[in-house]
Amino acid sequence: MTPPQYQHGPSKATDFYRENNVIFLTGATGFVGKTVLEKLLRSFPQITKVYLLVRISGTKTPQDRVEHDVFASKIFDTLKAQFSSPQEFHDRIVSKIIPVAGDITVDRLGLSNENLAMIQDDTRVVINSAASVSFDDPLNNALEMNTRGPFRTFAVAQGIKNLSAFVHISTCYVNAPMIGAHIDETIYAHPFGEPEAIYEMLSKMSYEEIRNYERSVVLKTYPNTYTFSKSLTEHLIQKRYKTMGLPIVIVRPSIVTAALAEPVPGWVEGVAAANKAVVSCALGQVQEWIGSANKKTDLIPVDIVAKVILLSATTADKSSAKPPIYHVGTSCLNPMTWGLFGSYLSTYWRAQIRTLAQNKDGKRLKVRISKAMAVPMTFKTFAVNEWFFDVTNTLAIDDAAPLELRSGLRRGMDWHRYMEDYNAGVQAFILRENVNRSLKIDYTLQSMQLAVPPVGKNNNSGLDKPEIAARL
């Protein structure tokens, strides 16, 4: 197969961001968006401006939100340490950030005429990270954020005068109905039929009709409204790709977890998705992890996701027949099992749980996320099934990447070391506890096996009576 020809391509990513040095980023206050922003600012000093779409409420200004919800994050400590003073950090880094008030649930993203003109005059690369990642959102909310939101962003992008790339962040689990399959980096036929017809039908439904469709149709095929809404969006992108005339690339991460290495090993933020599961085990709220112990996980560190997002932009080409798609996951390389995942959680937190139980901040956090008791059931579909997401496209651009964007995905993961860092990261960055690295944790086979029920006990892998993959 002849490799694709790019104007820049992954091997010239540094040149790409030197020429395309003005970025419009949505979702910068989220876990993935914030990691992309930090990597962009730390590794590409040639970037001159980053427009951040920021939703505001009350008396907060866009600048307030950036200062409190973005730059106050511990993820920027490594970058701040490169400067002699806070003032120098502000002058060299913060001054590049231009927050603009907006909302992806509003036409034109809620941008003022002045801000819209500014973005469309200057921007060279759009990275759309804004989304609702809640697994239990009502369908109408998920569609508003994850389907209509991206197309409002596409509409703004169509007015950008010199757009080189539009990176749309999706999820590997758009193909969640294909349980057990080897899934290529492509868009398969939608299980419900013609995507435009589905979208038009949903647009005409009342609130009650949508809720009924969610229960009777969507959730019988997809694990949640998040994966369905993301899937519908991809299908609509494919249908409208030529008419939109945008240089779109699609990046599909799997289950995004703590950083592997950058800016520090184990950096993590937010109590959502897999992070919620780890925190819930840490606080003793979850004593049993529901899942099939031998099924493969697909966890992917957030810093690897950020690198692939930035790298993928160099391959955008609106003259192509379809948008390039990049999976970012580990299921086709050296995946960990759910049983081993649960064992690492239980082994680490058994050694820590007494300390956490005595800590006042830990108690407050325990109250704040009391709903996390539902975590095992929320993850049930993912933990009793497995998917194998092909990463051929991603490995090809990663192999060609300059050092600052090379993820090392092909080398595979050292899961023992990673899970130590992940658990310690949750303890340090989410629970805000001092991490005692001198504490000896028993990772012997005998200790790890205590967390996994014997084979044959509660091993019904059906969704109604799933087995217990691990116990705390």
Image (spheres, rainbow, N blue to C red):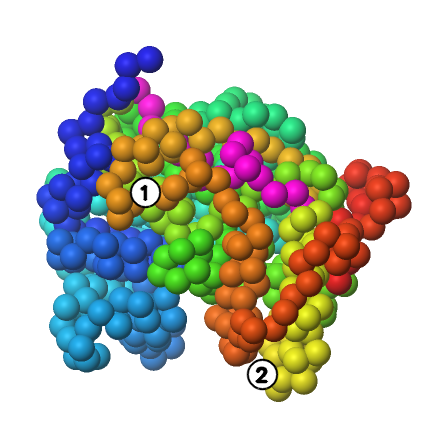
The residue positioned farthest toward the right in the image shown? 457
Label 2 belongs to which residue? 361
Rendered view: 428 above or below 236? below
1 vs 2, front mark = 1
Q: In which quarter of the image is residue 223?
A: top right
Q: Which element type, helix, strand or loop, lies under badge 1?
A: loop
Instruction: Tell me if residue 177 comes above or below residue 142 in the rendering.
Output: above
- Residue 61 rendering spot, x and y as whole percentages: 29, 74
Residue at the spot 46% in from the left edge and 50% down from the top edge: 301
Query: Which amino acid, by three-letter code, is at mark 2?
Result: Asp
Q: Is residue 408 left or right of residue 288?
A: left
Residue 292 in the figure: left or right of residue 330: right
Q: Is residue 326 one of those drawn in magenta?
A: yes
Residue 251 placement: quadrant: top left
- Residue 263 lies left or right of residue 464; in this view the side is left
The magenta stretch is 321-338
Residue 67 image point, x, y percent: 30, 74
**Residue 342 in view (yes/no):** yes
Q: Quadrant of the N terminus?
A: top left
CA gap between label 1 and label 2 equals: 38 Å
Q: Is residue 375 visible?
A: no
Q: Is residue 245 left or right of residue 199?
A: left
Measuring 80% from the left and 44% from the top, which residue is drawn there? 466
Query: Measuring 23% from the left and 28% from the top, which residue is drawn there?
Result: 318
Give whichever of 99, 398 is nearer the camera: 398
Residue 367 is covered by the magenta coloring: no
Type of amino acid under label 1? Arg
| Upstream in sequence: badge 1 or badge 2 | 2
Report the residue marked by disc 1: 406
Which disc is residue 33 wearing?
none
Magenta region, main secondary structure: loop
Nearest the eye: 289 or 352: 352
